[in-house]
Image: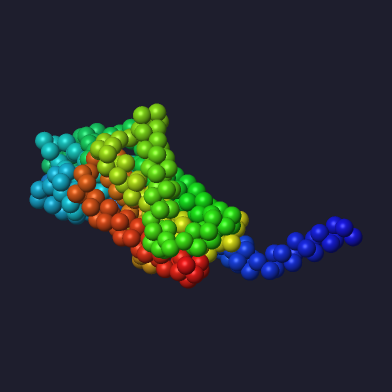
Amino acid sequence: MRIAALVKRICQQMLRDKRTLALLFVAPLIILTLMYFLFNGNTVDPKLAVVNVDHSLANVLEEADINVKQYEKADEETIVEDELDGLLKMKSGKLELTLLNREPTTSKALQLKVNQAVSLYTQSKRMDQHASSVKLPQNSIDTQYVYGNSETEFFDVLSPVLVGFFVFFFVFLISGIGLLKERTTGTLERLMSTPIRRWEIVAAYLIGFGIFAVIQTVIVVLFSIHVLDVVMVGSVWNVILINLLLALVALSLGTLLSTFAASEFQMVQFIPVVVIPQIFFAGILPLDGMADWLQAVGKVMPIYYAAGALKGVMYQGLSLSEISGNIFALVVFAVIFIILNIFALKKYRRL
C-alpha cells in the first residue's frame, strides 16, 4: 500500500507538471525527426575545376560523380573564391591536384575518386589501338592543399567547433540555473522592492555572470591551444573575441529561458530543445547536403555562426574582417536576447 501511495503521488506530480510531460514525450520526437532529415540528406557531388585536362579524362571524372568545371586558368584563389573542392591541372605531362581541404572527409573522398578516374582513364587509353598518339599522364598525382596538409584529420576541423560548443553549453547552463536560484531563494523579490530598473537588473546579471564567462572562455581557449595542441593558424585574440561573443549570447539566452522555468529541473529540460539541436548545425555534419529548409533552420542557430568563425580563424587562418559576417550575426543574437530578457522580466516578474 505504501508503494502504491508513493507511485500515485509521483504520477500526480508528473500529471500536474504539463511542461515536463510535454518535454518528456515531445522532445525525443523532435530530435529524432531532426536527425532523420539530417542523416538522410542528399549527397553533394564534389566540385572540381580542371585546367588543360584531356576531354576524355574530364568525362571519366564526371562519370565518377564529380561536378567538373572547365577553366582556362585557375589557382588556389580560384578554388576559394568559386567555392570549389579542388583543382586538377595538367602541367608538364603530370597531373597536379590541389584540394581545398576545408572538410578533410570531402577532400579524401574527392582524392580517391580522382585517383580511380585517372587510373581508369589511363587503362582505357592503353588498351586503345591508337594509344601511341595519346600523351598519357603519369600514374602518380602531385597533391597539394589549400588548408591543412595530408595529415589533417577530421578532429583538426572539429576541435574549433568543440571549443565554441563547450563555452556555449556551460555558460548557458550556469547562467540559467544561477538566475533561477536567485528567484527561488527570494533574492530577486528583495531587489524588486528597490527602485532598480529592469535593464539595470539584466545588465548587472550579465556583467556578474559575464565575468566568470570571460574567465572560463579564456581558460578553455588557452587550454585547448597550448595543452591539447589543437590546430591554430590564425590569431588567438580573434578566437578569444569570438568565444566571448558566443558566451554573451549563451549568457543572455540562459537568463532569458530561466524566466520560463520554475525549477532547476525545468531549466535542464531546455537542453534537449535548445542546446542539442545546435550541435547538428555546428559544422560537425556537412550542411551542403541538407534540405533547404534545414539549412534555413541552421542559420537561426548562434552556434552556426560561431563555429564558422572559429573554423575560419583556427583552421583556415582568416582575419577578423573575413569573418565579419559571423561576428555581426553573434552581436545581433546577443542584442535580441538581451532585449527579450528585459521584456521577459516585465511579463513574468512584474517589476
State whether residue 16 is above or below residue 217: below
Q: Is there any visible trace of residue 70 in the rendered image? A: yes
Scheme of image coloration = rainbow
User: At 13% across and 47% down in the image, what residue appears?
Assistant: 74
Coordinates of residue 60 in the picture (x, y in percent)? 26, 51
Instruction: Report the front residue among 159 and 241.
Output: 241
Please say whether residue 109 is visible from this viewpoint: no
| Residue 34 x/y as whole percent | 48, 61
Residue that protrudes farthest toward the right in the picture:
1
Q: Is residue 134 above or below residue 251?
A: above
* Most distant residue in the front direction: 194
Q: Residue at x 27, y 39 (%)?
A: 237
162 sits to left or right of 235: right
Q: Residue at x 47, y 46 (%)?
A: 170
- In front here: 96 or 36? 36
What residue is rendered at 40% in x and 47% in y?
210
The part of the image, by quadrant, that contains residue 19 is: bottom right
Quadrant into which the N terminus falls? bottom right
